[in-house]
Image: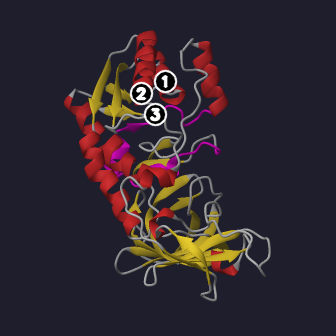
Amino acid sequence: MKIFVGVSGGVDSAVAALLLREQGHDLEALFMANWDEDDAYCSQAQDFQDARAVCKELGIVLHRVSFAEEYRRQVFDDFLAAHRAGRTPNPDVLCNREIKFGVALAHARRLGATHLATGHYARRVDGADGPELHKAADRAKDQSYFLHAIDREQLSAALFPLGGLTKSEVRAKARAAGLPVHGKKDSTGICFIGERPFREFLAQWLPDAPGPVVDEQGIELGRHRGLAFHTLGQRAGLSIGGLRGRAEAPWYVARKDAGRNALVVVQGQDHPLLMSQTLVTGRAHWLAPQSTDRFRCAAKIRYRQTDQPCEVGVRDDGGLELRFDAPQRAATPGQFAVLYDGERCLGGAAIESI
């Protein structure tokens, strides 16, 4: 079979390519340029040079392709729309489904590939009922949360060479092979934003919509620049410290009152308004045979969260109702609730309400 490997210029994708080459596969590489604005925060030009150096070292052909138009239309437009609606989206989930295992996989297939490999920390297991998505061996790096929305046909064509390795093992392999990116710092943050102040970036696309910052009794404590610039559980950037007659404890965003354009804040990291035990999602996407009844499993409502035991009910509209054994902090509409049965990712859905 012919495999294309997505090479980003980082150490993870470089070692994914290294492992596939060592296994003797017919291998070519693909560098995806998904953002068409170049500024001080965008490392795309340097990343491409690093990808070229890796492919030269490994002796594999590198293709560069731009999916910037598709990214704007299929990922970024939804990202902005969600923020306008007061939600907090996760564009990396959409990027995996629509771009990496959508248009990029289709592009690789047009060039003769049967599979697309990436540097994700996850495992694909061939089960009795088809391909399964499992957690990576390195729990601290597991990225199955971000991959839960790809469909089973996309999963069947996916390869995750790093699934059984820890991050330290990946860096050691890169160093031993003399790959030029073995010590390169991991990228953080949303792919198209880079490591820039988030609200600074968002303000380029969304206008200010000022409103009151209020406590749980509705007393105004300050002003916000727009609900879109805040997320539930947020502590920094509220600018309401040192209020007369108030405790010195930090304030946290607990609710967004769209009707009043008000940001509701509370004091105390575990204030009751920050906690919820039940949430409702939109229509679920399944990577396992769909259940039509109530069942127990575990769920994550954010990346890196430990598995949280819960009971799941499937609604008539295809959405889910999750009731957790323990209250969850800052469950956020727009983020994803992702379901697990032990190692296996069952699927997930966007949180609608709590």
Residue 129 in sight here? no
The magenta span reads: 139-166
Q: Secondary structure at mark 2?
A: loop
Q: Do tag 3 and tag 2 residues touch (Cβ < 8 Å)?
A: no
Please state which amino acid type lies under the numbered disc 1: Ala
Alpha carbon of mark 1 to alpha carbon of mark 2: how far?
A: 6 Å
User: Residue lying furthest left in this view?
Assistant: 110
Is residue 278 found inside the magenta-colored segment of the image?
no
Give above or below for 66 relative to 204.
Answer: above
Q: Are marks 1 and 2 in contact (CB under 8 Å)?
A: yes
Q: Earlier in the sequence, mark 1 or mark 2?
A: 2
Disc 1 crowd rating (10 Å Cα; few below 14, some 14-19, many 20+) is many
Q: Which mark is residue 168?
A: none
Q: In the rendered image, which residue does mark 3 sit on?
A: 40
Q: Residue at x 66, y 57 (%)?
A: 306
Find numbered disc 1 in the image and state the secondary structure of the residue it sits on.
Answer: helix
User: How many labels were placed on the picture?
Assistant: 3
What x and y, as percent, mark residue 330?
60, 69
Answer whether residue 148 is magenta in the image. yes
Q: Residue at 24% of width from left, 34% of height from top? A: 107
Which residue lies under the disc numbered 1?
14
Q: Residue at x 52, y 65 (%)?
A: 230
| Frontmost residue, 178 versus 133 | 178
Q: Is residue 225 above or below residue 74?
A: below
Displayed quadrant of residue 232: bottom right
Say whether disc 3 or disc 1 marks the residue closer to the N-terminus.
1
In the image, which disc is placed on residue 7?
2
